Image: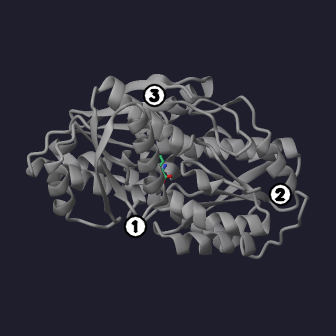
Amino acid sequence: MNRMKRITMSIAITLFLVGCKAEDKKEEGTVTGDTIRIGVILSMTGGTSAFGQMTWNGLQVGKSMRSTVLGKEVELILVDNKSDKIESANAAQRLIQKDNVIGIIGDVASSNSLAIAPIVEESRIPHISPASTNPLVTQNRKYVFRACFIDPFQGEVMAKFSYNDLKTTKAAVLTDIGQDYSVGLSDAFAKTFTKLGGRIVAQLNYQSGDQDFTAQLTAIKQTKPDVIAITGYYTEIALIARQAKELGIKAVMIAGDGAEAPELTKIGGDAVEGLYYTTHFDEKAVLTPLGQRYVDLFRKEHNEAPDALGALGADAYLIMLGAIEKAGSTDSEKIRDEIEKTKDFQGVTGVMTIDSNHNALKSVVIRQVRSGEFVYVASVKP
Ligand code: PHE
């Protein structure tokens, strides 16, 4: 079965399950239903659909590694947020009120997780974002956690790598002002790059969905940067790279985790060759036995290299299950408390400890596009 078909099938099965179970009543604090229901909010369609699909695939692999807790089958109820903030908030409402989920996993894009957060806070339902890296997602929230590092660290690694390893001193920064993630990451990059002695020679903006970047790139070209940091998501990064190449811009390009999708090379082609990006996982840098098991299973099922998003999806799921198990019940307060206590968890993407701000302390992985492949370059510890 090809990948798209498999994804469509899993959605169909999940939707079928939603339909069947909608009448069951949830009883707080006890394990009474047939299944343990966890809501999943992901961008299965829309601007960042690659993120949703990769995360869902990884979650399914995670589920094949562990599918029961408290002696019951886990039921994942997937809702597509169509890569949209309002849809994300609506999805959270629906999962909590109608489907009676005991926890929520999702989304990837920080702006969407930021839309989910107030709703889970109010309903007191534990929420783990697998991959949202903007610090505000978990800040001052009691029920919101993440399975990844945050952007002040990611931006610092991007800047240090650019300045110390690539020996660049003049940077241009391109920010997607429609995404909280991009705004925060650009800021972190610029701060560290300047602190190290580098200069930010241009700072320009665009919006998710834009297709023409000629104005920004023409302005950037005049400032002669030796590195261009693009902090948005894969589609725009790929288009920017292509247009930069057409304009004869030779600067090396660096992006954050938002670059990670097969579409980067599909859309970007030759123009993204040599581009560096920071991310969360690479099978060449597996740190735990669970990570190795995940890689083997993923390769067997998908016949391709595992991506960071899937690995983080599996981690978010396994952290949630571990917490439910330790809580010994479906009581959301107890589950929340157990997620907060996560320490030295031997996850898929590494050993995780959730800190007091509900962030995971983990290494950043640096990769480069070479011959259309994402190649492991280095890992940087916090
Ligand atoms: N970190 C990105 C955000 O917060 C999401 C992302 C994570 C994208 C990992 C790709 C890979 O919006």
- Tell whether 125 sits left or right of 181: right
Residue 228 position within the rendered picture, expressed as x and y whole percent measured from the top left:
27, 43
Q: Amino acid at mark 2?
A: Ser
Say whether residue 330 is visible.
no
Q: Mark 1 or mark 3, which has the lower sequence index?
A: 1
Q: Are marks 3 and 2 in contact (CB under 8 Å)?
A: no
Residue 309 position within the rendered picture, expressed as x and y whole percent measured from the top left:
49, 45
Q: Mark 3 or mark 2, which has the lower sequence index?
A: 3
Residue, x 79% and y 63% (percent of image)? 124
Q: Point out the residue furthest to the right here.
A: 30
Residue, x 23% and y 65% (percent of image)? 211
In the image, 151 versus 262, the foreground residue is 151
What label does residue 332 carry, if any? 2
Q: Residues within 10 Å of mark 1 (few under 14, many from 20)?
A: few
Locate residue 79: give its quadrant: bottom right
Q: Mark 2 or mark 1, which has the lower sequence index?
A: 1
- Tell whether 306 sits left or right of 59: left
Q: Say what secondary structure mark 3 lies in.
A: helix
In the image, 272 versus 332, the foreground residue is 272
Q: How far apart are labels 1 and 3 at the CA level?
A: 28 Å
Q: Say what secondary structure mark 1 lies in.
A: loop
Residue 279 position within the rendered picture, expressed as x and y whole percent measured from the top left:
44, 38
Name the residue carrying label 3.
283
In the image, 26 versus 243, the foreground residue is 243
What label does residue 46 carry, if any? 1
Locate residue 160: give its quadrant: top left
Q: Amino acid at mark 3?
A: Glu
Q: Are marks 2 and 1 in contact (CB under 8 Å)?
A: no
Say whether residue 64 is visible.
yes
Q: Amino acid at mark 1?
A: Gly
In the image, 76 versus 82, the foreground residue is 82
- Tell whether 366 sits left or right of 206: right
